[in-house]
């Protein structure tokens, strides 16, 4: 059993870890943007290079006689790597380009949802040319000045600007919308939603949808949800696979929306989605809404979810590609997890600490250490990259204990690094519960 893993971050270290726990004992051939020390340990070959160089990637796949390919990051998925691998006869656990538009085009996603699940979307409009008058009327009159402007293509998580946060005035918002139209021909402008965000990821094979535990990510750089947005500073899951601030109905609605979205994609694109559907939701005063969909595992979400998977990940991936996915193939342990990302001190503002050494404590059985943007020199010294360094995950019977495990290990990471001490703490979780209560009072 030979698995090709296309990688760029700690998410794929977690994927490789789940693969290596499989009784099928697969051989992992990794293709990664960096010489990831975690992937190096778990794979029989690690090819380092540009994962958007598709002829190079498919050549590796063909030469290695791959049985299954898994594409982790958004870029190669959005640019159609699955189409090429499938054309070579390689079963691939990632959606094709047309289906991946659910992530790679904000306007495609919003239009699809409005058509099939109207209650899931906020008020929005897609502009394909710069019409200052109608844009201004939409923002000021219809949205009452509380709005969000979304670049229509992948932009490394930096394409969305929110009024009152990144956009200080209507003029700034209009200027950004204009920029978006000039660069990619269209822009989504929508109502700013107020609430608490969470992620629900599902394994999807056409209309077969099997959900994973719900996760909450923390996108802001600093303690107390302050500072610039990042790829995600940390995440947690709870023992009951829901989240403390969600009602049963909220979670049921999110599950239903993931299911309906898989069906809508099949109808609209005429072919089945094979991969991970990641619903980014926000619980608002009268229910939940979709913020976005991704066509892949989340990072760090995968770092919490995959260690809990107690059934065979290889079998699940195979079943996704063949259309034989069933609920009974997927089992998750009833534990809580807290993941905190160790990052360079100046992340995400600058890359000043790149190349400096970092060390980690030995990780006990109830924790995981997944390597992201970090390399190892010939002496075995770990060196920082410029982005998120490593995710440390605590796993326990309660959230409080999982947080304590992760926090203790993070404090013992040595080097010019930092992490968010507040993620997974009782105080922060109580704040989320209180925000929801206040909204729905
Ligand atoms: P996205 O790239 O679509 O996940 O957006 C990035 C972030 O922007 C989300 O995690 C939200 O915090 C914020 N965001 C996106 N859409 C909205 C919205 N309609 N209302 C409020 N915040 C939003
Ligand atoms: N954690 C956010 C993402 O993977 O997009």
Image (cartoon, rainbow, N blue to C red):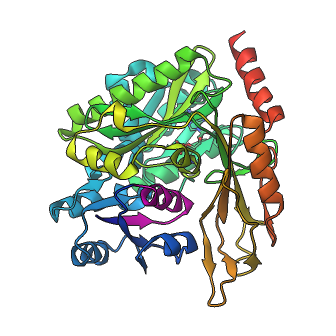
Q: Nearer the viewer, residue 124 or 76?
A: 76
User: Which residue is outermost to the top?
Assistant: 441
Percent of width and height locating residue 304: 59, 46
Above or below, 375 against 251 in this view is: below
Tell me what residue is drawn at x 44 percent, y 58 percent.
73
Above or below, 146 against 393 in this view is: above
The reply to whether residue 242 is in sight is yes
- Toward which corner of the image does residue 168 lie, by quadrant? top right
Which SS does the magenta portion mostly show?
helix
Percent of width and height locating residue 173: 60, 43
Tell me what residue is drawn at x 55 percent, y 49 percent.
307
- 227 vs 101, left or right, is right
- 339 vs 121, left or right, is right
Tell me what residue is drawn at x 48 percent, y 25 percent.
254
Q: How many marks?
A: 0
Q: Nearer the viewer, residue 367 or 292?
A: 367
Stretch in magenta? 5-22
- 86 vs 57, left or right, is left
Percent of width and height locating residue 174: 57, 43
- In the rendered image, residue 20 lying in the magenta stretch gets the answer yes
């Amino acid at each position: 059993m030979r698995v090709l893993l296309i990688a760029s971050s700690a998410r794929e270290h977690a994927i490789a870890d789940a693969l290596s726990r499989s009784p099928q004992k697969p051989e992992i051939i990794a293709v990664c943007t960096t010489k990831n020390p975690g992937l190096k340990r778990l794979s029989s070959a690690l090819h380092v290079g540009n994962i958007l160089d598709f002829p190079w990637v498919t050549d590796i796949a063909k030469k290695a006689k791959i049985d299954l390919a898994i594409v982790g990051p958004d870029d190669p998925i959005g640019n159609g790597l699955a189409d090429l691998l499938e054309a070579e006869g390689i079963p691939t656990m990632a959606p094709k380009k047309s289906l991946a538009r659910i992530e790679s085009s904000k306007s495609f996603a919003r239009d699809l949802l409005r058509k099939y699940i109207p209650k899931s979307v906020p008020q929005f409009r897609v502009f394909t040319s710069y019409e200052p008058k109608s844009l201004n009327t939409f923002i000021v009159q219809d949205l009452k000045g509380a709005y969000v402007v979304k670049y229509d293509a992948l932009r490394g998580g930096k394409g969305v600007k929110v009024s009152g946060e990144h956009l200080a005035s209507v003029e700034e918002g209009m200027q950004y919308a204009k920029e978006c139209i000039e660069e990619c021909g269209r822009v989504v402008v929508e109502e700013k939603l107020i609430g608490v965000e969470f992620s629900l990821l599902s394994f999807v094979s056409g209309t077969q949808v099997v959900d994973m535990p719900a996760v909450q990510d923390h996108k802001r750089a600093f303690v107390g949800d302050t500072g610039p947005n990042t790829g995600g500073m940390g995440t947690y899951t709870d023992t009951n696979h829901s989240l403390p601030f969600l009602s049963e109905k909220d979670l049921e609605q999110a599950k239903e929306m993931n299911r309906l979205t898989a069906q809508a994609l099949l109808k609209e694109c005429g072919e089945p989605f094979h991969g991970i559907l990641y619903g980014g939701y926000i619980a608002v005063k009268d229910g939940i809404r979709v913020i976005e969909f991704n066509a892949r595992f989340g990072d760090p979400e995968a770092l919490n979810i995959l260690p809990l998977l107690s059934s065979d990940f290889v079998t699940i991936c195979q079943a996704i590609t063949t259309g034989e996915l069933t609920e009974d193939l997927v089992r998750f342990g009833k534990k809580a997890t807290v993941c905190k990302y160790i990052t360079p001190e100046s992340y995400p503002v600058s890359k000043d600490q790149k190349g400096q050494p970092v060390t980690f404590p030995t990780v006990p059985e109830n924790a995981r250490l997944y390597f992201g943007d970090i390399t190892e020199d010939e002496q075995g010294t770990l060196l920082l990259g410029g982005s998120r360094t490593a995710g440390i995950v605590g796993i326990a019977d309660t959230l409080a204990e999982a947080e304590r495990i992760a926090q203790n290990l993070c404090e013992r990471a040595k080097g010019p690094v930092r992490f968010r001490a507040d993620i997974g703490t009782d105080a922060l979780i109580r704040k989320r519960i209180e925000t929801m209560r206040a909204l729905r009072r």
